[in-house]
Image: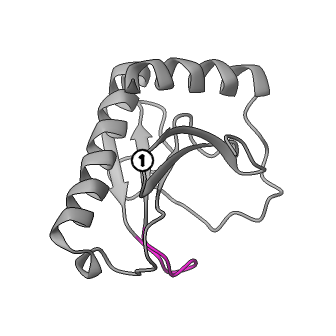
Amino acid sequence: MDEDAYGVRIFSTDQVDAVLQRADIQRGYTLIIWRGRHVVEPFELDKSEANSYWSAILAVAKALVAFYQPLKMNYETLGNTVPHLHTHLLPRFVEDPAPGRPFPLLPQSGDEPKIDPGLLASDAAALRALLR
């Protein structure tokens, strides 16, 4: 499935999905989700798995930077709420909710305001093109 209530898949491999988030938390906010065997921590991956995971993160981050032109990218590998390996990619812009500090991410409830569907679809298409 390329879309669900949380976002739109913009990139995938056999082991990784990248999902551009639908919630209007930060434009370009993307989750990289490990779809291989269940692990909680990156160090649980073997060398090949780790290469696959981090290579996907770098490829998606590069596309996000090329498209959105942020001042900085943040990479947050947390797992406090959902104990399965995933990394939040957050572009940081001039207009920022927490300049100089970590992005104020809260667990999503599903009730967050949503990005305009047309804008989300347009962004997803542009990012997919960059990731081909």
Percent position (x, y) of residue 36? 43, 68
Main SS of the magenta part reads loop
- Residue 70 visible, this orientation: no
Residue annotated with mark 1: 13
| Closer to us: 129 or 24 | 129
Q: Amino acid at mark 1?
A: Thr
The answer to whether 132 appears left or right of 104 in the picture is left
Q: Which residues are magenta?
A: 78-85
Where 55 falls versus 53 (above or below)?
above
The answer to whether 69 appears left or right of 107 in the picture is left
Percent position (x, y) of residue 59? 30, 37
- The structure residue drawn at horizontal position 27% and vertical position 55%, both measured from the top left corner, is 52
Where 2 falls versus 15 (above or below)?
above
Percent position (x, y) of residue 14? 43, 53
Percent position (x, y) of residue 109? 77, 65
Magenta stretch contains residue 110: no
